[in-house]
Amino acid sequence: MEINGVYPPITTPFDEQENINFSALEKNIAKWNETGLAGYVVFGSNGEYAFLSEQEKLDIVKACVANAAKDKKVIVGSGCESTRDTIDLTNKCAKLGADAALLITPNYYKGSMNKKALKEHFIRVADAAELPILLYNVPKFTNINMDSGLVEELARHPNIVGIKDSSANITQLAQIISQAPADFNVLVGTAGVLYPGLAFGAKGGIMALATCCPKECLEIYTLFNEGKYEEAKKLQMRMIPVNNAVTATYGIAGLKFVMDTLGLIGGPTRRPLLPLSEEEKAKLKEILVKANLL
């Protein structure tokens, strides 16, 4: 499977009672369908997947598959702590029409998640999965980093087709790209390294910023592929403060606020994630103004 282009790890909109707002989700997807986004990643980190029940996750997959345009892939964040549960959830999503699975590294027993344990976990899942597998390396949440050597070994499996690397370590990203097979889909996991990632040979990105600012992320990707490197770099630099704001600084609450501000539906977070304060909202709006988004 070829997986390239720009993907948003979509948020899960909730109502004031913290129930999933499926009407808002459908409206967001309808707007994203009008863009050049390659598809959607559902119940990933930005989808507050850790706070969703299995049934909620499956209901979100159903809604996304039903509403996504035919040319958009649906990738599911079906990684669980146990190998058994990961296989089960992944195959349930496959039956609902998902195109691929994005699997986070198990991390609760991180002291035991050495190279041998991780390799066996992903190979067992890939052997049993009914759809293609993407590895998900996100050390800021898991405190586990999949180095390029491990990724190279896993990339030999015919059903492990790529990786979302959210380490923001551009050297490691380059090593993964250089060591993995040419048809292995390496995607950057943060918009802050989209331009340098593309320069090293990444095939695209799964980025929080694409959820609220798809146009700008797509423009960086398109300008780069057209050889307009200076224009792509200039836009990349302009968007870095926004990306930092909706990831490291203000997190999912910030991302949802920017969505609300720019014409999408973010809505509230699910507790224990807290909403932004009025002071934080004002600072975030200043960042949007400086980036020419408001």
Image: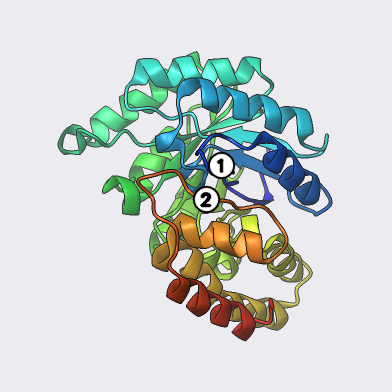
Front-lying residue, 114 or 85: 85
The image quadrant where one finds the C terminus is bottom right
Element under disc 2: loop
What amino acid is found at the position of numbered circle 1 in the picture?
Phe
Residue positioned 35% across, 20% down in the render: 83
- Image quadrant where residue 216 sits: bottom right
Q: Is 148 situated left or right of 32 in this image?
A: left
In the image, which disc is placed on residue 14? 1
Quarter holding the N terminus? Answer: top right
10 Å neighbourhood of mark 1: few (<14), some, or many (≥20)? some
Q: Residues within 10 Å of mark 2 (few under 14, many from 20)?
A: many
- Residues 175 and 127: in front is 127
The location of residue 27, given as percent across then percent down, is: 76, 44
Residue 1 shows up from this direction:
no
Residue indicated by mark 2: 268
Q: CA distance from mark 1 to mark 2?
A: 6 Å
> Eyeballing the image, is 71 above or below 101?
below
